[in-house]
Amino acid sequence: MSLKGCSIEIRGCNNKIVFEEGVRLADVKINIVGNGHLLRMKKQSSINEGGRIRIEDESNQLEIGEHTHIMSAFFALSDVNTKILVGNNCLFSAKVIFRTSDSHSVLNEAGERINKGKNIDISDHVWIGYGVNILKGVNIGENSIVGTQSVVTKSIPPNSIACGNPAKVVKTNITWTEERINEQ
């Protein structure tokens, strides 16, 4: 495990951070406020070039899968009992934002909250481009790509490319590799 230039602040009870073998973080700020939260980074995962993890309220969970590499990201879990689950072998560019909630309450005419938090689920082998925003309630299927500066408000099926604001599927039946393949 390697933590370079990181800061970790925890306030509350029964919070747990688990960094498995080979986890690397550089210039990441972690704030955990409230009770019963879990932050887990699995084997050989990394967050490089800065980022922020903000977990607040009660019983939230952020899990980053094995061999997932993130340039920089902001993970915001700011409601009760929400999760961000990131699969294995994912690749995220810089300035990616994940939000399980709107952070503030929107009320209907009866004074009832109508914008509750929702989970985010990123499947295995997903590539997220620079500056993407992924909002509450989104699932991104395996082998998919989300294009630069997209705002993801709805789920994306497996083996798809989605881009835009809001993001829309523009191509299906694809996969990707980290290798650059040059055709002759």
Image (cartoon, rainbow, N blue to C red):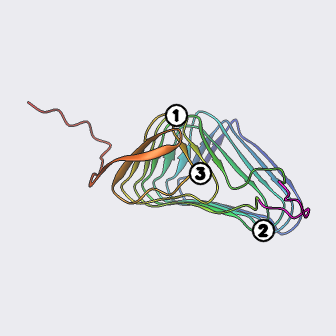
Q: Is residue 135 above or below residue 59?
A: above
Q: Is residue 19 visible?
A: no
- The residues bearing labels 1 and 2 have C-alpha atoms spaced at a distance of 30 Å
Report the residue that reaches farthest toward the front: 109
Relative side of 26 to 128, left or right: right
Of the residues tagged 2 and 3, which is closer to the observer? 2
Q: Is residue 8 above or below residue 112?
A: above
Q: Which residue in the structure is indicated by mark 3? A: 1
- The residues bearing labels 2 and 3 have C-alpha atoms spaced at a distance of 25 Å
Residue at point 44%, 51% (across, down)? 90
Identify which amino acid the numbered label 1 is placed on: Gln
**Horizontal and vertical percent position of residue 165:** 53, 38
Q: Which residue in the structure is indicated by mark 1? A: 149
Circles 1 and 3, Cβ within 8 Å, touching? The answer is: no
The image quarter in which residue 28 lies: top right
Residue at point 64%, 56% (across, down)? 136
Q: Is residue 12 above or below residue 52?
A: below
Identify which amino acid the numbered label 3 is placed on: Met
**Horizontal and vertical percent position of residue 89:** 42, 55
Q: Which residues are magenta?
A: 106-114
Identify which amino acid the numbered label 2 is placed on: Ser
Neighbor class of circle 2 (other Cα within 10 Å; few <14, some 14-19, many 20+) is some
Residue closer to the observer: 118 or 106: 106
**Horizontal and vertical percent position of residue 142:** 39, 60
Relative side of 19 to 113, left or right: left
Q: Which residue in the structure is indicated by mark 2? A: 59
Q: Mark 1 or mark 3: which comes first in sequence?
A: 3
Q: Mark 2 or mark 3: which comes first in sequence?
A: 3
